[in-house]
Image (spheres, helix red, strand yellow):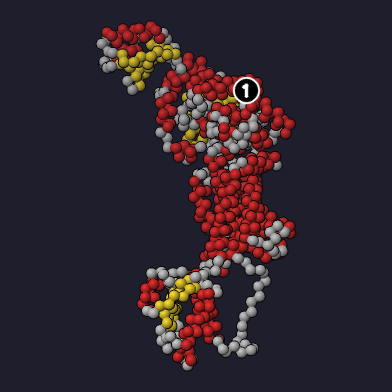
């Protein structure tokens, strides 16, 4: 029995469908990532899985319990860290933990032990009695991770756990999650729009765009699934006739895509293709205005499956009407 | 039960750490009590009244002597003599005086001949309170003028003897029950309205909704914690307000127990109403925007500042269902009359029923999802 099982989940708000017939399963002990830009439907999906909103159709089972028919059993099985920082700023770290332990019905003795142990585990032991309003963003996120584990769940949901954190805090949260997953034998599902986060943390990644699942596999296999081991990003001063065909004829080239005068060339041998490209351009009297060669990233995977880069998709999402986004949540 | 207590614990801890919030919820009702209590509570004095004497007869002299006596003692008005009626009327229009008493020629002769003597009071009727005070003083004064020298040993006319059941109630004491209910309401508005919606908008409720807490536990937790804060505000206002307003024996244990009961039931009723109003609201601006309207709509029709008998019919309808009305009535009975439980039984029953109905409706409308 998988820890998390989503079967044809669809969630619509009026005529707009945020999630469309999405299916996947997550095995026990797995760290599973939902990668996609803002507005892709990740948060909606995690809210369906954590019983916060009912699906329009389809179903999901968490720890074997149906999210609609056995919502209470699902809630007892999971820990959830919402996207917004939801700790009470006026209360201390320990008080926040205790309140949630009581909401989960944790017995007093177990509560005392769990709060102390978890605060130590997220390096907040010495801050236990300090008000949360004095915490940095990273500290607050670590507190919330500890809070989500106060009732010792085996399945943990995190909605964009490092959004808004500085690079050092992000790394700190990643290390914390990796450690806690190992110590508590957790199954983790997290959403993120950071490729490096998904790449570094997740055993498997589901790429989601416009509410649809576009690819699902381990980061390595996803990267291997697209043509070429290297990606050349190149732009030229001018584009002679048939230039795209010329580029495709270069040695070891697997795939060429043009995106607003920037050509992305997938190659099985980056150095060889690069030297041939420079020579071909010189012969054709075309000046290379920019050139970069890199290994395949998840952004390339996202580009391959969606036709646009993840960073562009993030910018597009920013243009959404904020009130519309609010209603959807 | 542990979950309900957790929500209450969280709210109480936050409340005790926000002294500003506590002060704000108590400060406004106390300021209102003191300012309104003294602004409306005093007798009107020193109104400037112009007298135009066109008679100069013996009876006019007597009448003016009586004016002088009132001006010196009750001080309701002060007289200013005019020789020219036009100048007096010009001063009246310019607001320098509040009224002109015109004593026409032949007034004394008409008095002697009992030929319907009249004096005219030309008044600035834009100020109803000043006009009422002046008319009252002048009617009384002319009544005394008419009775001069005719008082028999046994009066032939029926007279009214007034016996007051309770000690004199200054307006500030009359206002105190309304101020206590207002403090409870403001606390309910802050706790059950503003903080509730702010927490929801900040995502705090999302954190609660993923726990196994039931819908009923959530509602009871929110309601009871709000009611507890409103109860504390009510207790503080009752104690402080009683001292400020000069209520006799404010800490009499028997009365205090009944007061605590009324404070508790009023707090529950008002927080339940607030919870019902806010149960589907997500926008933090809504409770702030409705605060003033709700305050006016509930406070003034309740009889807190003016007797309900003086209201138009449509306003009496509001008074009939307004929980403020029943809370204010109960507090008046206890604070001003030190009445027994029988006098407040109906108020308690209405407020309890009101709380149950509001809670039930709020529970039906409450969504245990986002």
Taking B338 as reference, is B301 left or right? left
Disc 1: CA contacts within 10 A as few (<14), some (14-19) or many (>=20): some
- The N terminus of chain A - image quarter: top right
Q: Is residue B338 visible?
A: yes
Q: Is residue A158 visible?
A: no
Residue at 48 percent of width and 40 percent of height: A327
**Which residue occupies the foreground of this view, B233 or B40?**
B40
Going by the picture, which residue comes out furthest to the bottom?
B113
From the viewer's perspective, is residue A242 above or below residue B3?
above
Q: How many marks?
A: 1
Q: Which residue is mark 1?
A: A180
Q: Where residue B124 appears, x then y in whole percent?
A: 43, 72
The image quarter in which residue B324 lies = bottom right
Residue at 47 percent of width and 93 percent of height: B113
Indicate the secondary structure of the residue bearing disc 1. Answer: helix
Q: Where residue B330 appears, x then y in whole percent?
A: 65, 61
Residue at 66 percent of width and 61 percent of height: B247
**Which residue occupies the foreground of this view, A155 or B248?**
B248
From the viewer's perspective, is residue B293 above or below residue A193?
below
The image quarter in which residue B19 lies = top right
The image quarter in which residue B87 lies = bottom left
**Which residue occupies the foreground of this view, B122 or B308?**
B122
């Amino acid at each position: 029995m998988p820890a998390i099982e989503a079967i044809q989940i669809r969630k619509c708000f009026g005529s707009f469908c945020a999630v469309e017939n999405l299916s996947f399963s997550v095995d026990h002990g797995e760290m599973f990532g939902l990668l996609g830009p803002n507005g892709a439907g990740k948060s909606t999906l995690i809210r369906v899985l954590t019983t916060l909103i009912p699906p329009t159709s389809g179903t999901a089972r968490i720890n074997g319990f149906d999210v609609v028919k056995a919502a209470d059993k699902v809630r007892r099985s999971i820990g959830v860290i919402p996207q917004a920082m939801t700790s009470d700023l006026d209360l201390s770290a320990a008080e926040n933990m205790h309140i949630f332990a009581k909401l989960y019905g944790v017995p007093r003795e177990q509560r005392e032990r769990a709060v102390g142990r978890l605060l130590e585990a997220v390096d907040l032991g010495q801050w236990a009695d300090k008000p949360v309003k004095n915490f940095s963003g990273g500290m607050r996120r670590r507190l919330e991770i500890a809070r989500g584990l106060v009732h010792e769940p085996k399945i943990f949901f995190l909605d964009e756990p490092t959004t808004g954190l500085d690079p050092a805090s992000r790394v700190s949260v990643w290390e914390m999650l990796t450690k806690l997953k190992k110590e508590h034998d957790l199954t983790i599902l997290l959403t993120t729009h950071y490729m490096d986060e998904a790449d570094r943390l997740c055993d498997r990644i589901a790429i989601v765009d416009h509410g649809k699942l576009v690819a699902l596999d381990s980061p390595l296999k996803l990267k291997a699934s697209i043509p070429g081991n290297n990606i050349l990003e190149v732009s030229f001063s001018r584009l002679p006739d048939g230039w795209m065909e010329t580029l495709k004829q270069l040695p070891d080239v697997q795939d060429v895509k043009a995106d607003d005068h920037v050509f992305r060339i997938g190659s099985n041998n980056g150095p060889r293709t690069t030297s041939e490209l420079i020579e071909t351009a010189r012969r054709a009297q075309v000046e290379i205005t920019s050139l970069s060669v890199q290994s395949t990233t998840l952004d390339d995977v996202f580009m391959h499956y969606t036709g646009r880069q993840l960073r562009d998709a993030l910018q597009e999402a920013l243009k959404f009407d904020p009130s519309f986004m609010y209603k959807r949540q | 039960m542990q979950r309900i207590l957790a929500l209450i614990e969280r709210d109480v801890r936050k409340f005790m750490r926000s002294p500003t919030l506590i002060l704000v919820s108590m400060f406004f009702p106390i300021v209102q009590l003191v300012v309104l209590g003294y602004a409306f509570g005093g007798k009107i004095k020193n109104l400037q009244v112009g007298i135009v004497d066109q008679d100069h007869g013996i009876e006019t002299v007597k009448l003016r002597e009586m004016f002088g006596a009132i001006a010196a003692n009750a001080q309701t008005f002060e007289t200013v003599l005019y020789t020219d009626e036009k100048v007096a009327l010009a001063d009246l229009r310019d607001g320098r005086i509040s009224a002109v008493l015109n004593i026409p020629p032949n007034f004394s002769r008409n008095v002697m001949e009992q030929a319907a003597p009249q004096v005219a009071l030309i008044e600035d009727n834009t100020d109803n309170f000043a006009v009422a005070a002046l008319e009252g003083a002048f009617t009384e004064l002319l009544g005394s003028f008419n009775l001069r020298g005719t008082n028999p040993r046994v009066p032939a006319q029926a007279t009214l003897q007034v016996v007051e059941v309770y000690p004199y109630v200054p307006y500030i004491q009359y206002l105190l029950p309304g101020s206590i209910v207002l403090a409870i309401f403001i606390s309910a508005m802050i706790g059950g309205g503003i903080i509730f919606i702010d927490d929801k908008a900040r995502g705090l409720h999302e954190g609660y909704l993923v726990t196994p807490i039931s819908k009923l536990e959530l509602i009871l937790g929110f309601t009871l914690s709000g009611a507890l804060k409103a109860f504390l505000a009510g207790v503080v206002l009752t104690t402080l307000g009683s001292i400020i307003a000069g209520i006799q024996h404010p800490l009499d244990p028997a009365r205090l127990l009944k007061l605590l009961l009324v404070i508790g039931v009023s707090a529950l009723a008002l927080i339940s109403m607030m919870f019902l109003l806010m149960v589907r609201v997500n926008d933090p601006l809504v409770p702030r925007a409705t605060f003033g309207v709700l305050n006016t709509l509930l406070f003034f029709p309740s009889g807190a500042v003016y007797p309900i008998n003086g209201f138009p019919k449509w306003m009496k309808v509001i008074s009939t269902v307004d929980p403020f009305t029943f809370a204010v009535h109960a507090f008046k009975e206890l604070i001003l009359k030190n009445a027994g439980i029988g006098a407040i039984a109906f108020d308690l029953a209405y407020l309890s029923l009101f709380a149950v109905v509001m809670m039930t409706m709020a529970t039906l409308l409450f969504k245990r999802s986002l």
